[in-house]
Image: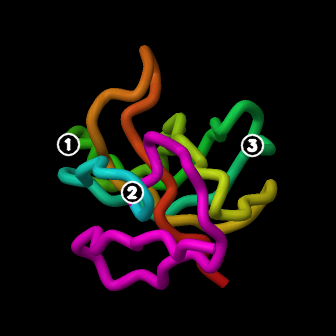
Amino acid sequence: MKKQQVNNIGMQVAAPSRQCDDAHCPFHSPVSLRGRIFTGVVMKDPFHKTTTVEFQRQWFLPKFERYEKRRSRIVAHVPPCIDVAKNAKVRIMETKKISKTKNFVVIEVQA
């Protein structure tokens, strides 16, 4: 049995223990990661290697000189070698366009 090579993705994250043949997996394919990094909560169960991640941010209101809480939802690709469940805290990173709405990939499930 041939051991598959694990790529260095440029981040200090633990590589998954399982192997996969996914073309969009940052650990087991030549996909490059660049750009923004977010940490959020999985809002929907992964379905067809896709999930929705939500995170909170603060938005400044100049009129009242205060901040308000807003939330953003991003669609992210889930490689088969990473186990993700609903309400799990994950880290996602930007990659090249995968589909019409997906240009982020899950790189880590945080405890």
Q: Identify the mark nearer the N-term, 3 or 2.
A: 2
Looking at the image, residue 46 lies above or below residue 82:
above
Query: Regarding mark 3 in the picture, which secondary structure is present there?
Result: loop
Cα separation, mark 3 vs mark 2, equals 17 Å
What secondary structure is the stretch in magenta mostly built from?
Answer: loop
* In this picture, residue 58 sits left or right of residue 63: right
> Which residue is labeled 3 in the image?
46
| The quadrant where residue 62 appears | top left
Looking at the image, residue 47 lies above or below residue 10:
above
User: Mark 1 or mark 3: which is in front?
Assistant: 3
Of 9 and 22, which appears nearest the observer? 22
Residue 64 covered by magenta stretch:
no
Kind of residue indicated by mark 3: Pro
Query: Regarding mark 2 in the picture, which secondary structure is present there?
Result: loop
Q: Which residues are magenta?
A: 1-26
Cα separation, mark 1 vs mark 2, equals 40 Å
> Which residue is labeled 2 in the image?
26
Residue for point 26% across, 54% down: 33
Q: Work out whether residue 64 can be spotted.
A: no
Kind of residue indicated by mark 2: Pro
> Which residue is labeled 1 in the image?
62
* In this picture, residue 14 sits left or right of residue 87: left
Q: Position of residue 103 (x, y in %)?
A: 37, 34
Of 33 and 44, which appears nearest the observer? 33
Kind of residue indicated by mark 1: Pro
| Crowd around label 3: few <14 · some 14–19 · many ≥20 (10 Å) | some
